[in-house]
Image (spheres, rainbow, N blue to C red):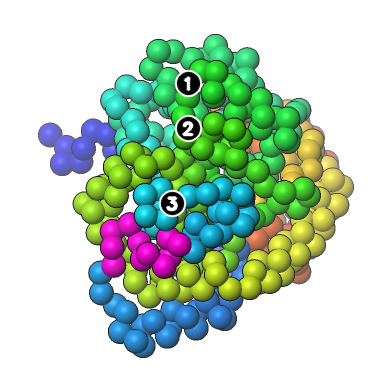
Amino acid sequence: MSIVADRMNEIPFAGIRRVFEKAGRLEAQGQKIIHFEIGRPDFDTPVHIKASAKAALDKGFVHYTPNNGLPVLREALAMRLKVDKGLIYDPDKELIATAGGQEALYLGLLSILNPGDEVLIPDPCFQPFTLIVRLAGGIPVHIPLQADNHFAYDLSAAKKALSPRTKAIIVNSPHNPTGAVLTDKQLQELVAFAAENHLLIISDEAYDRMVYQGSFVSPAAFPGMKERTIICGSLSKTYAMTGWRIGYLAAPEPVIEAAHRLQQNIMISLNTFAQYGAVTALSESQTCVQDMMAQFDRRRRLVLDLLRQIPGLALDDSPQGAFYVFPRITLPDMTSAQVADYLLDNAGVAVVDGGSFGAGGIGHLRLSYAASYENCHEGLERIHQAMRALVKQGPHRQ
């Protein structure tokens, strides 16, 4: 008898982990690796946010806080939701602070799913969507995204996938791994589909402040949809606070009440002085966010320009959000996994096989431009040289 639970057979390590560990071994051997595999801002957390957390620590704010987060933090979250998204949430009844956006996803899904409930999930997608649904006792049902339509949901396929057990649909815009942002029309159609079929929407809004053209719109902003939408948010990307582990869940009161009880038995409460830093991030000047986004947009334009010149890769769309590009491989005799390995071994550039994000990602690579401008330039030049050599080799390369 195995001492490990059977459910863990369905929970693999993340594909990104394998790339990151291999890149680390090469670096230990003295190689310079350009990291395009890591989905986190390379910027330091702004000084004023760190100073606030340090001050809280010095004041002795080192003990438990309420399970749902400091009241002042929940009030700051409610304020940002109102200012940034035009949404009104009761900080006491409709919000809970979480250990990052990923715990928000877990608390939200565990709060609503009964065993056997089905959840529609975009394909490709952030891998934990599928795994969290399984851990919560649900059944993930993958719906293809349309690469030729800005990676919008294929709603005809979604309609065919519906069953009496379908309870929710996950929406992620800006999207990981593609960087796509749903257009107003696409989002409106998706919201209408959810409403017509009595589905809850799980909206992963981790990249809500990372939109390069236009503005972010939450599904909860549509008439009658706040009651059907569960927002999973995060401070990680917006304020370069990935290691602080501060996120939030904004949802109807019954969901928050259930999540509150879960939090009591999972985390007890979040890091106290980190919460005070988060209050400062949310409440004070947002210039740091604007400055970081300007740098990301500069990198984005560089990456898009250089990527379009690389043989063997094709970019069918210009991503409008997050910090990812998702080029398609045009070599018929190589898989995306093989190309990803080739680039790490021969160019010293770590990228992620699109298959790590589901069947819909096979044949693509995810590149994160959360690296310095100089490293983005060097990394794309390395990829260009390596891919040019690979294309020249012709068929039967491997």
Asked if residue 72 is positioned above or below residue 349 in the image, the reply reads below
> Which of labels 2 and 3 is toward the front?
3
Of pointers 2 and 3, the one earlier in the residue sequence: 3
What is the secondary structure assignment of the residue under circle 1?
Answer: loop
Is 141 included in the stretch rendered in magenta? Answer: no
* C-alpha distance separating marks 2 and 1: 8 Å
Is 72 included in the stretch rendered in magenta? Answer: yes
**Residue 302 image label:** none
Image coordinates for residue 227, horizontal then vertical, percent: 47, 35
Instruction: Assign the N terminus to one quadrant of the image.
Output: top left
> Which of labels 3 and 1 is toward the front?
3
* In this rendering, position of residue 19 left or right of residue 135: right
Image coordinates for residue 92, horizontal then vertical, percent: 37, 55
**Residue 90 image label:** 3
The residue drawn where x is 35% and y is 45% is 256
Image coordinates for residue 86, horizontal then vertical, percent: 61, 49
Residue beneath label 2, please? 228
* Kind of residue at badge 3: Asp
State the extent of the magenta-drawn residues as a range.
Answer: 65-75
**Residue 198 image label:** 1
Q: Nearest the camera: 39 or 277?
A: 277
* Kind of residue at badge 2: Arg
Q: Residues within 10 Å of mark 1 (few under 14, many from 20)?
A: few
Of pointers 3 and 1, the one earlier in the residue sequence: 3
Of pointers 2 and 1, the one earlier in the residue sequence: 1
